[in-house]
């Protein structure tokens, strides 16, 4: 096999066809669709990498790869891209980028997932459409626009970078664009996206920018069940608001049923000449009128008869209409497509309905019952006129497509568009019956005749799709005397026939009978002349025509009617002239008779470019015929309607210039013609007619021929400008200034034509005269009257528009000087905005493209800009002009711009910088000026930088500039003016700033090292590091695609900046110490950037800083030879730790940095002979801190708050270790906040306690290191400590740690008692203490459980690996709950089933293993409790709190134990754990610091078990005695387990194991332990007896069988135990528990006397009997304490009151005086003080209100035991 060889360029790009899983390390896995860059090949293998991860290279099989044609691009490194169109490449890249984010959206369950999926599908569909290769060019442009819109929409949705595009929609390459054009492209893209984002629907309204539009209509099919005759389909556009058609008809012939016909697939029409006003109509409807062609009546007969009768009469009868509202389509609100079919529902027309009425009714209807009948058609709105639409959409507009024009002129009438049409509408008529019995079926026939009565041929157009006709026949309505047709058609009469032509209307009755119909002749006639007597055309509007009856139905051609009046208006005028209405009414002429009963109304609209309806305009156009009224006609031109003038624009201008050239009386006519010309130009410039400007320009270029006009025009114009004082009204001069553009076009064109005819003759005088004219206009700028402001402003606005034309006949440099003079003539304080607009127009003129002209213009431009920037006036236009100039000189085809840049830089760079400084960042202009600044610096090369640096007069000026520009750079980097998604603009700004920093670094090194200027060096370092650390350069945070683009175009700018900073640092020399430690944080920020080369190059700066401080002089000696050095770098170390904490917590740094820092710094320190020890210590310290901070940062973002707490404690312990109190306190409060979030109030209190321990009870002012933001207003030690204690007490109360709260209260009381003497505070805290004491005794406090957790394996975080912890459980949390909680935190961990130590393999594995078990706290008696009887409520706290030792046991098998009795061989290993700190503490867990174990024998296990069992049983009895509401189930289970040998084995197992003679012989040393075990067994019997009595009192009936069984078992057990191990005193009888009054049952457990002092039955044996006591007081034993207390159930006492135990029954009967004395005497004979006190309580129960019921139940219990013993 041959070796690896490089692949050919054509093989470098491939796509993975299948998934591939790598089997060897050198192989690379592939995913379907991966794009691959292939570098080498060998046999059946390729070597390369995927474009989604360029860092991983490997081999993969050829069989899995599809090679695509590609091209190689070399920028900063070689890359390949598919050889596809730019839009396809863009789509591919976008889809890859979206796909990665789309998966993340799915994982997160984001609602944007579906939106992105929809957009991706749409983009993929468009990509497939493009790559099919079948898309026409016009459609491809639309698809491209659609794709780019969707891409922009998706990028906006996903928060990706803005894509900037050029005018063609392609992605703009920043390398080919200037800074300003790139900035403006970003602005346009942002505006475009803002419109997309703010629009309600996805298809935003298309902006209508063109003046002409077309509507493509292609009918597909017409469905009508009753269309059995032939039909005409007439399609036209209808304005529903005005109620009229505004386009011609498109005619379609529809064959009736019975004839073969096809669908309408070949019919296509373009409704053209639609202007913006048409598209903006309120409601536009597409109407299809259906006209039936056939007989008058329509009957459904068989097809053969119908076929025979078809087309015999050919009467046009109304059949129905189909309509559709297309307003949204023509406005672009709804996307129109030729593939989409629209439905026009069809509605029939009845015999008595007019078509116009049906149309209005259908449009107004909300729903139509069309039954599926109607017209199917496709629609598409096209831009431009018919010619343009056909060029752009050739696949739509074929050669057979019909043109349907608008009725009337289009909005723009181009030269050469000659029309002479009349649109005629038959409105309505009124006809008498005549000799008919019913109303006539009137048919109107229209034709055009000349003055001889001959019909003109082919002059009537009924529709756009048929040839011209000779006549038009109307629709016939059945028996209608007042028909309303509303039919419109076009009459196109040649201009030579128009003057003598007239319209003739003949009326004919159409009979239903075919025979009669053939005999019918026209019975009436009407007519109207197309021209009026004054030479104008027929006026637009309605005309009421007279109807003349034809006698004896004579032939129409033989009639003589032209001498008769034709309209009602003419008749009235004739009547007024002759004064005899009767004479006119009886007028007859050759077979015609007039009747006033009949009337016929029409409407006409003349659409002619040669004929006018205006007399004044006609007089001007025919001025030669009447030269005597020429002056009046010229003056009257301004009164002519503008629409008439623009229609006859060419003729009007021809007439004006003919008058100008052929009239010798210049003094009279030149000014009038000039005035008329200004009026016409002003009319064209008006917004209403501004779309005629191209028409006027085309006329000047193609039709204008007045070769001598320039001289007269300049003379008149110069006269008006120079003679302002002669004209009181300046309005006309203002109009002249607004017309300058076209006036100069006429002048220049005239001069060009003259020079062409005369070989350039007269050029000199012409240029002199033109220069004089410009000078006159310039001199006009010197006027300071306010009345001249508008004229001067107009001159500056419109004069630059003449530059392109004047350059044809005048020198460019001379023109530039004239313009400079004009601008400079304007006083500085006047017309500032107008001046800048004039300058802006000059910049955009052709003058600015000429280098020599720029040299003349730029000084003036820069002076004006500088003046305005300094006073901050007209900043917006200044920014625009600056941007235009800089963008212009960036072009490559305008000659040399080197000197232009120098001039602009020297004059405007500093003002621009200062403007950026002054502008607020929220001002929109800020971004514009920043773009200008970036453009300045981008276009400056090394020569310009050196030139600018050297132009400063003094070193101080240069220093000020550098300080200024560096601060601006830093501010731009920290407070971005460009949005974050303007990636290309931000990167360009960064590259420009880096380039500038390189140049400025050399300047600083060369000019400010000696003498040293610290501030400029400091500004440079801060600016450079801010540049390096900005978010937009952190490549690791970007996608692979974006990172690749940045590196390929700009490289990694961080690396270059870092090298520049390093070079600057080591050029500081002895001045370095001035930047230690202030620069430590910034340098650290730089080195933390995750770029390997940058880190390696800059970390050693820290060692250099250490040396600088170490060898810095601490004091100056008088002897120069002796110097004292500091000898440490404590300030550097302090700052390093501070900054490292902030930066790493903020997300900087990683383990690679920690390792690299350690290796570089350790090597440097270890090799240093003097700093070795301190340096190595520092490196290890910082490395350890980084480790802790990285762990903290990793854990802090997780949900596991316990791990957060552990990391926090590690950090605060570290800071405490190095005595960094401010950091220590900071993390203490973080820990406190974490505890509060988890409601761990106890631990939060302990955390604050550590802060309080750092404070003293003094008025000493608080140092900064001891403060915290939570207590901002505390300013002294005691003040802060007081506030901390207040919170600690509050948290302790919430955590039921009342003992700790009491300790804090005592400290506060002591402080206020001995220092502040604030008795009010003392009283407050004393009350708090009382509450805490009472809570200890009265409130139930659950005892926490403790658990041991061991974390084995290296899969845990480092602070947990192979460590053991003791956890303090939450309230009521048992072992199973705790295990579940820990497993939820570590779901991958495996729970170990045994407590034995793990194998080394487990500890070293990468897995996670948990070992969890319960541990018991080891109570250590407090010294203050020694020898005292302590309340159990008090002791319970100390038994489970403030403990540091814990124990647990695990069974250990030894020897051969008896199988029947495992107790004999039950050895256990007891382990004692010691934690680092007592629990509770600042955590709910602490690590185990030491462990000790020892073995426990089976006998010792038995003793311990019995002691535990007895203790638990005793505790249960106490609980039930204290609380009536305790559940009985735990007591039942425990009693049953002890007394029932079948459950637990009873004590017989112990007897068999330890009480045998064999055991005592073999274990002689255990005799005492055996005796102890027997004693414990005997002591258990009284406890069981008491428990069973309580059980009997509390059980329900359904538990009685269990209780009886327990009593039976207990009797057997008691008999056995008492017989073998002796009888122990009983605790007392509890059988009458139920009979206690309810008020005693409710006594809280804390208010009762302790049972502990009464529980020792042995101490009660010396007391006397109850009989003695009862005899002393004269009461029975059952009534000493009340009748309801000690009465047995079923045998109530004599004085007892029978009351239900569930009621507040039973009253305490107090003994009388004699009884109390007897009892007192008896008690005094007893030595037991407790008994004495108890009796005294009974005797005097009412003497202490606070002890009214105190220990009452316990006292009854005591008496029972006392007197039964």
Image (cartoon, helix red, strand yellow):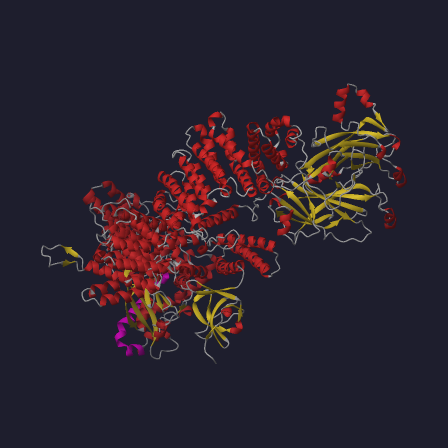
Task: Spot the residue most to the bottom.
Answer: 1
Q: Position of residue 1751 (x, y in %)?
A: 32, 50
Q: How many marks overall? A: 0
Residue furthest out toward the left: 1119
Q: Nearer the viewer, residue 310 or 1447?
A: 310
Instruction: Say above or below: 795 vs 1244.
Output: above
Tell me the residue at 22%/64% (across/down): 1175
Tell me where the magenta segment starts and ends, as one range.
Answer: 1558-1586
Q: Position of residue 392 (x, y in %)?
A: 61, 51
Q: Nearer the viewer, residue 1564 or 1279?
A: 1279
Which part of the image, by quadrant, shows the C terminus?
bottom left
Find out whether residue 1566 is within the magenta segment.
Answer: yes
Q: Is residue 508 left or right of residue 691?
A: right
Point out residue 1570 in the picture as x, y percentages from the top left corner.
29, 72
Tell me where residue 587 sits by quadrant.
Answer: top right
Q: Nearer the viewer, residue 388 or 377?
A: 388
Position of residue 96 relative to residue 1395, above or below, is above
Residue 557 position by quadrant: top right
Q: Is residue 1048 left or right of residue 574?
A: left
* Residue 509, placed above or below residue 1160: above
User: Residue reaching furthest top?
Assistant: 579
Query: Is residue 669 located in the magenta-colored stretch of the structure?
Result: no
Q: Is residue 1751 visible?
A: no
Foreground: 542 or 1003? 1003
Visible residue check, residue 50: yes
Q: Can you tell which quarter of the image residue 1488 is in?
A: bottom left
Q: Position of residue 705 (x, y in %)?
A: 59, 39
Main secondary structure along the magenta-highlighted residues = helix
């Amino acid at each position: 096999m041959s070796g690896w060889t490089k692949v050919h360029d054509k093989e470098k790009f491939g796509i993975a066809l299948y998934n591939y899983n790598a089997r060897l390390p050198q192989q690379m896995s592939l995913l379907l669709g991966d794009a691959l860059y292939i570098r080498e090949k060998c046999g059946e293998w390729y070597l390369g990498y995927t474009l989604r991860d360029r860092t991983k290279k490997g081999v993969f099989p050829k069989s899995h790869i599809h090679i695509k044609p590609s091209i190689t691009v070399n920028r900063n490194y070689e890359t390949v891209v598919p050889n596809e169109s730019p839009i396809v490449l863009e789509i591919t890249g976008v889809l890859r980028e979206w796909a990665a984010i789309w998966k993340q959206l799915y994982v997160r369950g984001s609602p944007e997932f579906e939106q992105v999926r929809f957009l991706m599908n749409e983009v993929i569909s468009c990509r497939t459409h493009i790559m099919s290769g079948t898309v026409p060019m016009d459609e491809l442009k639309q698809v491209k626009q659609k794709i780019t819109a969707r891409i922009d929409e998706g990028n906006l949705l996903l928060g990706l970078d803005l894509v900037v595009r050029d005018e063609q929609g392609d992605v703009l390459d920043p390398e080919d664009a200037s800074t300003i054009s790139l900035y403006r492209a970003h602005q346009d893209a942002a505006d475009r996206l803002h419109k997309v984002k703010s629009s309600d629907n996805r298809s935003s309204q298309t902006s209508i920018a063109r003046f002409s539009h077309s509507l493509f209509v292609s009918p597909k099919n017409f469905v009508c069940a009753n269309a059995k005759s032939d039909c005409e389909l007439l399609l036209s556009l209808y304005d529903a608001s005005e109620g009229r058609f505004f386009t011609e008809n498109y005619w379609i012939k529809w064959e009736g049923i019975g004839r073969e016909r096809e669908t309408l697939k070949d019919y296509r029409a373009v409704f053209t000449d639609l202007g913006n006003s048409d598209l903006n109509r309120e409601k536009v409807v597409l109407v299809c009128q259906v006209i039936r062609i056939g007989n008058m009546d329509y009957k459904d007969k068989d097809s053969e008869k119908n076929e025979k009768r078809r087309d015999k009469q050919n009467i046009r009868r109304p059949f129905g209409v189909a309509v559709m509202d297309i307003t949204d389509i023509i406005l672009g609100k709804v996307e129109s497509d030729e593939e989409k079919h629209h439905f026009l529902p069809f509605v029939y027309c009845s015999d008595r309905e007019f078509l116009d009425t049906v149309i209005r009714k259908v449009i107004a209807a909300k729903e139509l019952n069309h039954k599926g009948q109607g017209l199917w058609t496709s629609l598409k709105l096209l831009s431009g006129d018919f010619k343009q639409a056909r060029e752009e959409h050739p696949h739509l507009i074929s050669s057979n497509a019909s043109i349907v024009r608008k009725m009337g002129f289009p909005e723009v009438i181009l030269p050469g568009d000659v029309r002479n049409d009349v649109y005629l509408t038959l409105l309505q008529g009124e006809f008498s019956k005549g000799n008919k019995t019913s109303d006539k079926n009137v048919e109107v026939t229209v034709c055009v005749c000349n003055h001889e009565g001959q019909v003109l041929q082919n002059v009537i157009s009924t529709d756009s799709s048929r040839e011209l006709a000779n006549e038009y026949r109307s629709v016939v309505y059945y028996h209608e005397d007042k028909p309303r047709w509303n039919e419109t058609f076009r009459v196109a009469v040649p201009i030579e026939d128009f003057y003598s032509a007239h319209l003739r209307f003949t009326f004919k009755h159409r009979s239903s009978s075919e025979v009669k119909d053939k005999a019918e002749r026209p019975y009436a006639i009407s007519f109207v002349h197309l021209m009026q007597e004054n030479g104008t055309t027929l006026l637009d509007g309605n005309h009421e025509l007279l109807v003349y009856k034809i006698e004896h139905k004579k032939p129409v051609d033989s009639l003589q009617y032209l001498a008769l009046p034709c309209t009602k208006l003419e008749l009235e005028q004739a009547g007024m002239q002759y004064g005899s209405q009767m004479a006119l009414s009886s007028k007859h002429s050759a077979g015609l008779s007039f009747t006033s009963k009949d009337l016929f109304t029409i409407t006409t609209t003349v659409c002619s470019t040669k004929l006018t309806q205006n007399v004044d305009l006609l007089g001007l156009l025919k001025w030669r015929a009447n030269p005597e009224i020429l002056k009046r006609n010229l003056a009257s031109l301004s009164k002519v309607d503008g629409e008439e003038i623009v229609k006859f624009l060419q003729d009007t201008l021809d007439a004006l210039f003919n008058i100008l050239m052929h009239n010798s009386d210049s003094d009279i006519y030149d000014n009038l013609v000039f005035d008329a010309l200004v009026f016409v130009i002003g009319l064209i410039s008006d917004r209403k007619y501004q779309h005629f400007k191209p028409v006027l320009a085309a006329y000047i270029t193609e039709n204008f021929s007045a070769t001598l006009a320039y001289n007269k025009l300049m003379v008149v114009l110069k006269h008006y400008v120079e003679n302002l004082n002669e004209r009181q009204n300046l309005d006309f001069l203002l109009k002249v200034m607004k017309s300058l553009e076209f006036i100069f076009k006429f002048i220049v064109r005239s001069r060009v034509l003259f020079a062409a005819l005369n070989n350039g003759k007269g050029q000199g005088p012409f240029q002199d005269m033109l220069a004089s004219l410009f000078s006159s206009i310039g001199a006009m700028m010197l006027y300071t009257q306010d009345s001249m402001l508008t004229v001067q402003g107009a001159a500056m606005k419109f004069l630059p528009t003449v530059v392109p034309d004047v350059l044809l006949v005048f020198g460019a440099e001379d023109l530039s000087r004239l313009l400079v003079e004009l601008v400079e003539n304007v006083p500085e304080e006047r017309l500032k905005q107008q001046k800048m607009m004039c300058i802006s127009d000059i910049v955009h003129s052709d003058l600015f493209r000429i280098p020599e002209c720029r040299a003349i213009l730029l000084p003036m431009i820069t002076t004006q800009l500088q003046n305005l920037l300094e006073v901050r006036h007209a900043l917006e236009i200044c920014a625009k002009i600056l941007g235009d100039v800089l963008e212009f000189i960036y072009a490559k085809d305008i000659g040399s711009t080197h000197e232009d840049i120098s001039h602009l830089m020297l004059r405007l760079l500093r003002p621009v910088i200062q403007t950026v400084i002054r502008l607020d960042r929220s001002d929109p202009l800020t971004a514009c000026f920043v773009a200008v600044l970036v453009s300045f610096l981008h276009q400056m090369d090394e020569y310009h930088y050196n030139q600018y640096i050297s132009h400063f007069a003094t070193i101080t000026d240069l220093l000020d500039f550098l300080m200024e520009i560096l601060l601006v750079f830093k501010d731009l980097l920290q407070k971005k003016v460009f949005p974050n998604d303007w990636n290309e603009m931000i990167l360009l700004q960064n590259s420009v700033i880096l380039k500038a920093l390189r140049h400025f670094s050399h300047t600083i090194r060369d000019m400010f090292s000696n003498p040293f200027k610290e501030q400029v060096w400091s500004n440079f370092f801060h600016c450079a590091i801010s540049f390096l650390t900005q978010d937009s350069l952190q490549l690791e945070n970007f996608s692979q695609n974006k990172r690749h683009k940045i590196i390929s175009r700009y490289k990694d700018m961080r690396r270059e900046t870092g090298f520049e900073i390093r070079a600057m640092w080591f050029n500081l020399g002895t001045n370095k110490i001035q930047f230690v430690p202030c620069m430590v944080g910034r340098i650290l920020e730089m080195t933390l950037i995750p770029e390997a080369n940058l880190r390696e190059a800059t970390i050693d700066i820290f060692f250099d800083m250490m040396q600088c401080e170490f060898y810095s002089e601490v004091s100056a000696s008088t002897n120069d030879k002796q110097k004292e050095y500091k000898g440490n770098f404590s300030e550097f170390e302090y700052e390093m730790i501070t900054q490292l904490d902030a930066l790493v917590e903020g997300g900087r740094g990683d383990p690679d940095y920690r390792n690299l820092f350690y290796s570089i710094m350790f090597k440097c320190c270890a090799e240093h002979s003097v700093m070795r020890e301190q340096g190595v210590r520092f490196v290890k310290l910082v490395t350890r801190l980084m480790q802790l901070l990285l762990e903290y940062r990793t854990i802090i973002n997780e949900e596991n708050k316990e791990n957060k707490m552990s990391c926090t404690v590690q950090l605060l312990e570290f800071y405490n270790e190095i005595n960094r109190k401010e950091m220590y306190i900071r993390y203490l409060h973080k820990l406190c906040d974490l505890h509060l979030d988890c409601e761990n109030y106890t631990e939060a209190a302990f955390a604050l306690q550590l802060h309080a321990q750092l404070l003293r009870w003094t008025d000493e002012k608080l140092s900064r290191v001891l403060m915290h933001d939570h207590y901002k207003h505390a300013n002294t030690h005691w003040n802060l400590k007081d506030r901390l204690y207040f919170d600690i007490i509050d948290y302790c109360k919430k955590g039921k740690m009342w003992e700790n709260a009491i300790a804090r209260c005592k400290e506060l009381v002591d402080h206020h008692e001995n220092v502040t003497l604030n008795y009010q505070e003392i009283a407050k805290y004393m009350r708090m203490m009382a509450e805490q004491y009472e809570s200890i005794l009265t409130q139930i406090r659950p005892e926490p459980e403790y658990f041991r957790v061991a974390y084995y394996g290296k899969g845990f975080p480092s602070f947990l690996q192979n460590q053991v912890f003791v956890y303090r459980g939450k309230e009521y949390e048992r072992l199973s709950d705790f295990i579940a909680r820990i497993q939820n935190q570590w779901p991958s961990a495996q729970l170990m089933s045994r407590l034995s130590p793990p194998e080394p393999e487990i500890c070293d594995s990468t897995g996670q293993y948990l070992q969890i078990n319960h541990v018991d706290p080891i109570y250590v008696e407090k010294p203050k409790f020694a020898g005292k009887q302590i309340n159990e409520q008090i002791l319970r706290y100390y038994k489970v709190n403030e403990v540091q030792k814990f124990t647990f046991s695990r069974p250990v098998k030894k020897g051969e134990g008896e199988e029947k009795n495992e107790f004999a061989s039950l050895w256990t290993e007891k382990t004692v754990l010691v934690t680092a700190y007592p629990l509770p503490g600042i955590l709910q867990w602490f690590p185990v610091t030491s462990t000790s174990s020892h073995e426990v024998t089976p006998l010792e296990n038995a003793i311990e078990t019995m002691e535990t069992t007895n203790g638990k049983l005793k505790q249960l009895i106490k609980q039930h005695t204290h609380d009536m509401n305790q559940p009985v189930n735990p007591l039942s289970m425990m009693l049953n387990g002890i007394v029932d040998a079948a459950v637990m084995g009873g004590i017989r197992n112990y007897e068999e194991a330890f009480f045998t003679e064999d055991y005592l012989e073999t274990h002689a040393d255990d005799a005492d332990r055996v005796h102890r075990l027997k004693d414990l067994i005997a002591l258990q019997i009284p406890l069981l007896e008491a428990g069973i009595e309580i059980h009997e009192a509390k059980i329900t009936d359904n538990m009685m069988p269990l209780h009886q069984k327990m009593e039976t078992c207990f009797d057997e057990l008691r008999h056995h135990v008492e017989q073998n191990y002796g009888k122990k005193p009983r605790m007392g009888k509890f059988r009458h528990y139920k009979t206690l009054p309810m008020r005693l049952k409710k006594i809280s457990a804390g208010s009762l006397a302790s049972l502990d002092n009464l529980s020792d039955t042995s101490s009660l044996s010396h007391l006397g009997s109850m009989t003695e006591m009862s005899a002393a007081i004269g009461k029975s034993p059952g009534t000493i304490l009340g009748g309801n207390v000690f009465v047995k159930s079923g045998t109530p006492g004599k004085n007892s009151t029978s009351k239900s135990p569930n009621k507040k029954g039973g009253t305490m009967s107090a003994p009388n005086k004699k009884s109390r004395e007897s009892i007192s005497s008896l008690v005094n004979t007893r030595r037991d003080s407790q008994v004495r006190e108890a009796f005294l309580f009974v005797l005097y129960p009412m003497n202490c209100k606070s002890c009214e019921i105190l220990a009452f139940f316990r006292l009854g219990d005591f008496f029972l035991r006392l007197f039964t013993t």
